[in-house]
Image: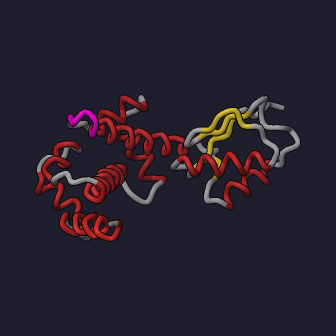
Amino acid sequence: MKTINKLRIKGMVCARCMTVVFDELSLLGIEIDSITLDEVSFIGGLPANIDFHEVKSTLQKYGFDLLSDKKEALIILIKLAVAQAIVKQFESKNTILFSVFLSRELNMDYPMLSSVFSEHEEMTLEKYIITQRILKVKDLLLTTDKSLTVISDELGFSSVSHLSRQLKSYTGFDTYHFKNLRKNSAISQS
């Protein structure tokens, strides 16, 4: 019987998720070597006496699931690459062509990535990228004093008006709504 040295897990999106998975698997008697957002590696492999279904149901109890499908694993990699591209674009202030970045990072043609993503998710890859960029815009509006012009430049939008339209289209709110939320939050904290 082949030793299972790692499991791919769907649904981990933050450090708290990794902590929950670590704690729950440890309670099952599994010694964990390392953990990332999509994978858990075991010291000496998964013990033979561990009930695989118990592991799966424990993970599902917290909204996680085991990845067994290569396409599901690819979706996770695409989402991680999109997040990486947004951070890289924000830090470098250079426009990134997501199709080129994803193709290079994942070593696959963009149409293939887009097709697999659309097949398994409830939106197209293009819409997912826009949604993630808008979430970053919202975060910046709620947590900084940066102007929409600066944010537009930092996140590679073609213009401030384009960003404003995207923000309104995806959230239903304009820039002033988010700035007012930030101001009201600052007032209530003082």
Image quarter of residue 94: top left
Q: Residue furthest right?
A: 49
* Magenta stretch encompasses residue 92: yes
Q: Nearer the viewer, residue 158 or 136?
A: 136
Q: Is residue 165 magenta?
A: no
Q: Is residue 130 visible?
A: no
Where does the N terminus fall, quadrant-wise?
top right
Please tell me which residue is depicted at 32% across the width and 42% down the height of the picture: 86
Determine the residue positioned at 78% across, 29% down. 44
Residue at 64% over, 44% down: 68
Tag count: 0
Q: How is the image coloured?
A: secondary structure
The image shows residue 128, relative to residue 170, as above or below, that is above
Q: Is residue 53 above or below residue 88?
A: below
In the drawing, does residue 161 fall left or right of residue 65? left
Which image quarter: residue 45? top right
- The answer to which quarter of the image holds residue 187 is bottom left
Residue 165 visible to an observer of this rendering: yes
Q: Magenta part of the protein: which range?
A: 90-94
Image side of residue 52 versus residue 38, left or right: right
Magenta span: helix, strand or loop, mainly?
helix
> Who's the residue at 57% across and 51% down the image?
16
* Image quadrant occupied by the C terminus: bottom left
Nearer to me, 182 or 127: 182
Across and down, in percent, residue 29 comes to 82, 44
Q: Position of residue 119 (x, y in %)?
A: 45, 53
Instruction: Describe residue 175's horizontal placement relative to residue 122 as left or right.
Output: left
Q: Quick check: 145 left or right of 13?
A: left
